[in-house]
Image (tube, grey):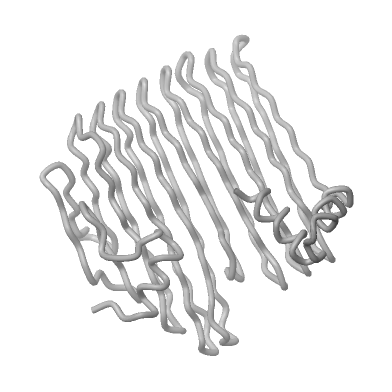
Amino acid sequence: MLNALDKLMLEKVADLHEIPQGAFNIRKNGHGVQRNTTANIDIITKQDKSGIDVIVKPYTKGESVHIPVIVTEDNINDVVYNTFEIGEYSDVEIIAGCGIHNCGDHKSQHDGIHTFYVRKGAKLKYVEKHYGQGDGKGQRVLNPKTVIEAEAGAIVELELIQIKGIDRTNRETDIKLMGNAKLVVTERLLTYLDQEAESSINVELLGADSSAQIISRSVAQDNSKQVFYFDLAGKNKCRGHIQCDAIIMHNAVVLSTPRISAYHSEAQLVHEAAIGRIESEQLIKLMSLGFSEKEAEDTILNGFLK
Protein backbone atom coordinates (compact mmCIF):
# COMPACT_ATOMS: atom_id res chain seq x y z
CA MET A 1 0.00 0.00 0.00
CA LEU A 2 1.08 3.57 -0.65
CA ASN A 3 1.26 5.94 2.31
CA ALA A 4 1.05 9.74 2.39
CA LEU A 5 4.81 10.17 1.80
CA ASP A 6 4.70 7.80 -1.17
CA LYS A 7 1.85 9.76 -2.71
CA LEU A 8 3.72 13.05 -2.20
CA MET A 9 6.78 11.67 -3.99
CA LEU A 10 4.64 10.35 -6.86
CA GLU A 11 3.10 13.79 -7.26
CA LYS A 12 6.55 15.39 -7.43
CA VAL A 13 8.09 13.06 -10.01
CA ALA A 14 5.10 11.99 -12.09
CA ASP A 15 2.36 14.59 -11.41
CA LEU A 16 0.23 11.78 -9.99
CA HIS A 17 -2.47 12.76 -7.50
CA GLU A 18 -3.96 9.28 -7.54
CA ILE A 19 -3.33 5.88 -9.11
CA PRO A 20 -3.22 6.55 -12.87
CA GLN A 21 -5.52 5.19 -15.52
CA GLY A 22 -4.00 2.95 -18.15
CA ALA A 23 -0.70 1.12 -17.95
CA PHE A 24 1.61 1.74 -14.99
CA ASN A 25 4.32 0.19 -12.85
CA ILE A 26 5.22 1.69 -9.46
CA ARG A 27 8.51 0.70 -7.85
CA LYS A 28 9.29 1.43 -4.19
CA ASN A 29 12.57 0.79 -2.35
CA GLY A 30 13.79 -1.72 -4.92
CA HIS A 31 10.56 -3.66 -5.43
CA GLY A 32 7.51 -3.41 -7.66
CA VAL A 33 4.43 -2.57 -5.62
CA GLN A 34 1.62 -1.90 -8.13
CA ARG A 35 1.11 -2.59 -11.83
CA ASN A 36 -1.57 -2.40 -14.49
CA THR A 37 -1.57 -3.29 -18.19
CA THR A 38 -3.98 -2.59 -21.03
CA ALA A 39 -5.05 -4.35 -24.21
CA ASN A 40 -2.39 -2.43 -26.16
CA ILE A 41 0.40 -2.05 -23.59
CA ASP A 42 1.98 -4.93 -21.69
CA ILE A 43 4.48 -4.71 -18.81
CA ILE A 44 6.51 -7.82 -18.09
CA THR A 45 9.02 -8.44 -15.28
CA LYS A 46 12.49 -9.34 -16.58
CA GLN A 47 13.64 -12.82 -15.65
CA ASP A 48 17.40 -12.38 -16.00
CA LYS A 49 17.84 -9.10 -14.11
CA SER A 50 15.98 -6.39 -12.25
CA GLY A 51 13.61 -4.37 -14.43
CA ILE A 52 10.67 -4.54 -16.80
CA ASP A 53 9.85 -4.85 -20.48
CA VAL A 54 7.20 -2.41 -21.72
CA ILE A 55 5.65 -3.51 -25.01
CA VAL A 56 3.45 -1.08 -26.96
CA LYS A 57 1.54 -2.69 -29.82
CA PRO A 58 1.78 -1.15 -33.32
CA TYR A 59 -0.79 1.58 -34.10
CA THR A 60 -1.55 2.22 -30.41
CA LYS A 61 -2.75 5.83 -30.10
CA GLY A 62 -3.32 8.21 -27.20
CA GLU A 63 -2.23 5.92 -24.36
CA SER A 64 0.30 6.57 -21.60
CA VAL A 65 2.58 4.54 -19.37
CA HIS A 66 3.61 5.68 -15.87
CA ILE A 67 6.72 4.01 -14.44
CA PRO A 68 7.75 6.06 -11.37
CA VAL A 69 10.30 4.96 -8.78
CA ILE A 70 10.26 6.13 -5.17
CA VAL A 71 12.93 5.56 -2.51
CA THR A 72 11.91 6.38 1.05
CA GLU A 73 14.65 4.59 3.02
CA ASP A 74 18.37 5.17 3.40
CA ASN A 75 21.05 2.60 2.55
CA ILE A 76 19.26 1.65 -0.68
CA ASN A 77 21.20 0.90 -3.88
CA ASP A 78 18.60 0.12 -6.53
CA VAL A 79 19.47 -0.70 -10.16
CA VAL A 80 16.88 -1.41 -12.86
CA TYR A 81 17.12 -2.27 -16.56
CA ASN A 82 13.96 -1.29 -18.40
CA THR A 83 13.37 -2.00 -22.09
CA PHE A 84 10.67 -0.34 -24.19
CA GLU A 85 9.34 -1.65 -27.49
CA ILE A 86 7.37 1.18 -29.13
CA GLY A 87 5.42 -0.43 -31.96
CA GLU A 88 5.37 1.06 -35.45
CA TYR A 89 3.01 3.99 -36.07
CA SER A 90 2.02 4.14 -32.41
CA ASP A 91 1.74 7.43 -30.47
CA VAL A 92 2.35 7.15 -26.72
CA GLU A 93 3.63 9.07 -23.71
CA ILE A 94 5.85 7.49 -21.07
CA ILE A 95 6.17 9.27 -17.74
CA ALA A 96 9.08 8.10 -15.63
CA GLY A 97 10.96 9.74 -12.78
CA CYS A 98 12.47 8.99 -9.42
CA GLY A 99 11.97 10.61 -6.05
CA ILE A 100 14.27 9.98 -3.10
CA HIS A 101 13.29 10.84 0.48
CA ASN A 102 16.30 10.26 2.73
CA CYS A 103 16.16 11.08 6.43
CA GLY A 104 18.97 8.70 7.38
CA ASP A 105 22.75 8.77 7.56
CA HIS A 106 23.47 6.44 4.65
CA LYS A 107 23.34 7.04 0.90
CA SER A 108 20.22 6.22 -1.12
CA GLN A 109 20.87 5.57 -4.81
CA HIS A 110 18.83 4.62 -7.85
CA ASP A 111 20.36 3.80 -11.24
CA GLY A 112 17.90 3.38 -14.11
CA ILE A 113 19.06 2.07 -17.48
CA HIS A 114 16.28 2.61 -20.06
CA THR A 115 16.56 1.27 -23.60
CA PHE A 116 13.99 2.31 -26.21
CA TYR A 117 13.32 0.80 -29.62
CA VAL A 118 11.08 3.30 -31.41
CA ARG A 119 9.85 1.55 -34.51
CA LYS A 120 9.03 2.92 -37.95
CA GLY A 121 6.71 5.93 -37.94
CA ALA A 122 6.10 5.79 -34.18
CA LYS A 123 5.84 8.87 -31.97
CA LEU A 124 7.19 8.80 -28.40
CA LYS A 125 7.13 11.44 -25.70
CA TYR A 126 9.30 10.48 -22.73
CA VAL A 127 9.24 12.58 -19.54
CA GLU A 128 11.72 11.90 -16.73
CA LYS A 129 11.72 13.94 -13.52
CA HIS A 130 14.12 13.61 -10.59
CA TYR A 131 13.50 14.98 -7.11
CA GLY A 132 15.05 14.61 -3.68
CA GLN A 133 14.13 15.62 -0.14
CA GLY A 134 14.72 14.65 3.49
CA ASP A 135 16.82 16.10 6.29
CA GLY A 136 19.18 13.15 6.78
CA LYS A 137 22.94 13.26 6.24
CA GLY A 138 22.82 10.47 3.68
CA GLN A 139 23.27 11.49 0.05
CA ARG A 140 20.53 11.25 -2.57
CA VAL A 141 22.09 9.87 -5.78
CA LEU A 142 20.47 9.29 -9.18
CA ASN A 143 22.26 7.95 -12.25
CA PRO A 144 19.93 7.60 -15.25
CA LYS A 145 21.03 6.18 -18.59
CA THR A 146 18.77 6.48 -21.64
CA VAL A 147 19.51 4.66 -24.90
CA ILE A 148 17.23 5.22 -27.91
CA GLU A 149 17.18 3.76 -31.41
CA ALA A 150 14.65 5.57 -33.62
CA GLU A 151 13.74 3.92 -36.90
CA ALA A 152 12.75 5.66 -40.12
CA GLY A 153 10.14 8.38 -39.69
CA ALA A 154 9.99 8.07 -35.91
CA ILE A 155 9.48 11.18 -33.76
CA VAL A 156 11.01 11.29 -30.27
CA GLU A 157 10.50 14.03 -27.69
CA LEU A 158 12.41 13.90 -24.40
CA GLU A 159 11.95 16.03 -21.29
CA LEU A 160 14.74 15.41 -18.79
CA ILE A 161 14.19 17.35 -15.58
CA GLN A 162 16.01 17.50 -12.24
CA ILE A 163 13.73 19.55 -10.00
CA LYS A 164 15.75 19.77 -6.78
CA GLY A 165 17.35 17.87 -3.94
CA ILE A 166 19.66 15.46 -5.79
CA ASP A 167 23.18 15.48 -4.31
CA ARG A 168 24.97 13.58 -7.07
CA THR A 169 23.89 12.62 -10.56
CA ASN A 170 25.54 11.26 -13.68
CA ARG A 171 23.11 11.40 -16.61
CA GLU A 172 23.87 9.61 -19.89
CA THR A 173 21.73 9.90 -23.02
CA ASP A 174 22.69 8.10 -26.26
CA ILE A 175 20.44 8.34 -29.33
CA LYS A 176 20.61 7.02 -32.90
CA LEU A 177 18.30 8.41 -35.59
CA MET A 178 17.54 6.71 -38.89
CA GLY A 179 16.08 8.23 -42.07
CA ASN A 180 13.67 11.13 -41.55
CA ALA A 181 13.56 10.50 -37.79
CA LYS A 182 13.12 13.60 -35.63
CA LEU A 183 14.34 14.29 -32.10
CA VAL A 184 13.70 17.11 -29.62
CA VAL A 185 15.46 17.01 -26.24
CA THR A 186 14.67 19.50 -23.47
CA GLU A 187 16.88 19.29 -20.39
CA ARG A 188 16.31 21.34 -17.22
CA LEU A 189 18.61 21.07 -14.24
CA LEU A 190 18.91 22.79 -10.85
CA THR A 191 21.74 22.35 -8.34
CA TYR A 192 22.53 24.13 -5.07
CA LEU A 193 24.52 23.71 -1.83
CA ASP A 194 27.43 21.39 -2.76
CA GLN A 195 25.51 19.25 -5.24
CA GLU A 196 27.19 17.91 -8.36
CA ALA A 197 25.60 17.03 -11.71
CA GLU A 198 27.12 15.65 -14.87
CA SER A 199 25.11 15.26 -18.07
CA SER A 200 26.18 13.72 -21.37
CA ILE A 201 23.94 13.79 -24.46
CA ASN A 202 25.22 12.03 -27.59
CA VAL A 203 23.19 11.95 -30.80
CA GLU A 204 24.08 10.22 -34.06
CA LEU A 205 22.15 11.35 -37.14
CA LEU A 206 22.58 8.24 -39.27
CA GLY A 207 19.71 8.44 -41.74
CA ALA A 208 19.01 10.89 -44.56
CA ASP A 209 16.87 13.88 -43.53
CA SER A 210 17.05 13.05 -39.84
CA SER A 211 17.00 16.02 -37.47
CA ALA A 212 17.76 16.78 -33.84
CA GLN A 213 17.28 19.75 -31.53
CA ILE A 214 18.82 19.76 -28.05
CA ILE A 215 17.89 22.52 -25.59
CA SER A 216 19.57 22.50 -22.17
CA ARG A 217 18.87 25.02 -19.43
CA SER A 218 20.38 24.91 -15.98
CA VAL A 219 20.77 26.95 -12.80
CA ALA A 220 23.78 26.44 -10.52
CA GLN A 221 23.66 28.00 -7.05
CA ASP A 222 25.80 28.09 -3.90
CA ASN A 223 28.85 25.80 -4.20
CA SER A 224 27.34 23.35 -6.68
CA LYS A 225 29.01 22.10 -9.84
CA GLN A 226 27.58 21.19 -13.23
CA VAL A 227 29.36 19.51 -16.13
CA PHE A 228 27.76 19.13 -19.56
CA TYR A 229 28.91 17.23 -22.64
CA PHE A 230 26.98 17.47 -25.91
CA ASP A 231 27.98 15.57 -29.04
CA LEU A 232 25.95 15.85 -32.23
CA ALA A 233 27.32 13.73 -35.07
CA GLY A 234 25.89 14.14 -38.58
CA LYS A 235 26.64 11.06 -40.67
CA ASN A 236 24.20 11.72 -43.50
CA LYS A 237 22.19 14.56 -44.98
CA CYS A 238 20.72 15.95 -41.75
CA ARG A 239 20.06 18.96 -39.53
CA GLY A 240 21.06 19.40 -35.90
CA HIS A 241 21.07 22.21 -33.33
CA ILE A 242 22.41 22.38 -29.77
CA GLN A 243 21.49 25.25 -27.45
CA CYS A 244 22.80 25.17 -23.88
CA ASP A 245 22.21 28.07 -21.49
CA ALA A 246 23.14 28.27 -17.82
CA ILE A 247 22.62 30.79 -15.01
CA ILE A 248 25.48 30.71 -12.53
CA MET A 249 25.20 32.15 -9.01
CA HIS A 250 27.25 32.52 -5.83
CA ASN A 251 30.34 30.23 -5.92
CA ALA A 252 28.98 27.65 -8.35
CA VAL A 253 30.89 26.16 -11.30
CA VAL A 254 29.47 25.31 -14.73
CA LEU A 255 31.48 23.53 -17.43
CA SER A 256 29.82 23.08 -20.82
CA THR A 257 31.35 21.32 -23.84
CA PRO A 258 29.17 21.29 -26.96
CA ARG A 259 30.60 19.42 -29.94
CA ILE A 260 29.30 19.05 -33.48
CA SER A 261 30.87 16.61 -35.91
CA ALA A 262 30.04 16.41 -39.61
CA TYR A 263 30.80 13.24 -41.56
CA HIS A 264 28.71 14.18 -44.61
CA SER A 265 28.82 17.20 -46.93
CA GLU A 266 25.09 17.86 -46.42
CA ALA A 267 25.12 17.74 -42.63
CA GLN A 268 23.98 21.10 -41.23
CA LEU A 269 24.91 21.41 -37.56
CA VAL A 270 24.86 24.38 -35.18
CA HIS A 271 25.76 24.81 -31.53
CA GLU A 272 25.25 27.70 -29.12
CA ALA A 273 26.36 27.94 -25.51
CA ALA A 274 25.93 30.72 -22.94
CA ILE A 275 26.71 30.97 -19.22
CA GLY A 276 25.91 34.09 -17.24
CA ARG A 277 24.29 35.63 -14.21
CA ILE A 278 20.80 37.05 -13.73
CA GLU A 279 20.58 40.41 -15.44
CA SER A 280 20.23 43.24 -12.92
CA GLU A 281 17.72 44.97 -15.20
CA GLN A 282 15.34 42.02 -14.81
CA LEU A 283 15.60 42.16 -11.02
CA ILE A 284 15.06 45.92 -10.94
CA LYS A 285 11.99 45.68 -13.17
CA LEU A 286 10.31 43.06 -10.99
CA MET A 287 11.26 44.84 -7.76
CA SER A 288 9.69 48.02 -9.14
CA LEU A 289 6.45 46.01 -9.40
CA GLY A 290 6.54 45.21 -5.69
CA PHE A 291 8.57 41.99 -5.61
CA SER A 292 11.24 41.53 -2.95
CA GLU A 293 14.71 40.75 -4.29
CA LYS A 294 14.29 37.08 -3.35
CA GLU A 295 10.84 36.90 -4.96
CA ALA A 296 12.15 38.57 -8.11
CA GLU A 297 15.10 36.19 -8.29
CA ASP A 298 12.87 33.11 -7.80
CA THR A 299 10.46 34.32 -10.47
CA ILE A 300 13.25 34.76 -13.01
CA LEU A 301 14.76 31.33 -12.24
CA ASN A 302 11.41 29.57 -12.41
CA GLY A 303 10.69 31.17 -15.78
CA PHE A 304 14.13 30.24 -17.09
CA LEU A 305 13.70 26.58 -16.16
CA LYS A 306 10.20 26.20 -17.61
Seen from the viewer's position, the closer of residues 84 and 92 is 92
Give me the residue at 66% from left, 45% from top. 229
Q: Position of residue 179 (x, y in %)?
A: 41, 18
Residue at far bottom of view: 105
With respect to residue 213, does 152 lie above or below? above
With respect to residue 277, does 235 lie above or below? above
With respect to residue 123, does 197 lie above or below? below
Give me the residue at 46% from left, 84% from top. 74
Seen from the viewer's position, the closer of residues 165 and 197 is 165
Q: Position of residue 192 (x, y in %)?
A: 70, 68
Q: Is residue 86 left or right of residue 124?
A: left
Q: Is residue 205 left or right of residue 137?
A: left
Give me the residue at 42% from left, 23% from top. 181
Q: Position of residue 166 (x, y in %)?
A: 58, 68
Quadrant in which the N terminus is drawn: bottom left
Residue at far left of view: 39
With respect to residue 124, does 177 lie above or below? above
Q: How many marks?
A: 0
Q: Is residue 198 left or right of residue 133?
A: right
Residue at far front of view: 289
Seen from the viewer's position, the closer of residues 127 and 52 is 127
Q: Position of residue 9 (x, y in %)?
A: 42, 71
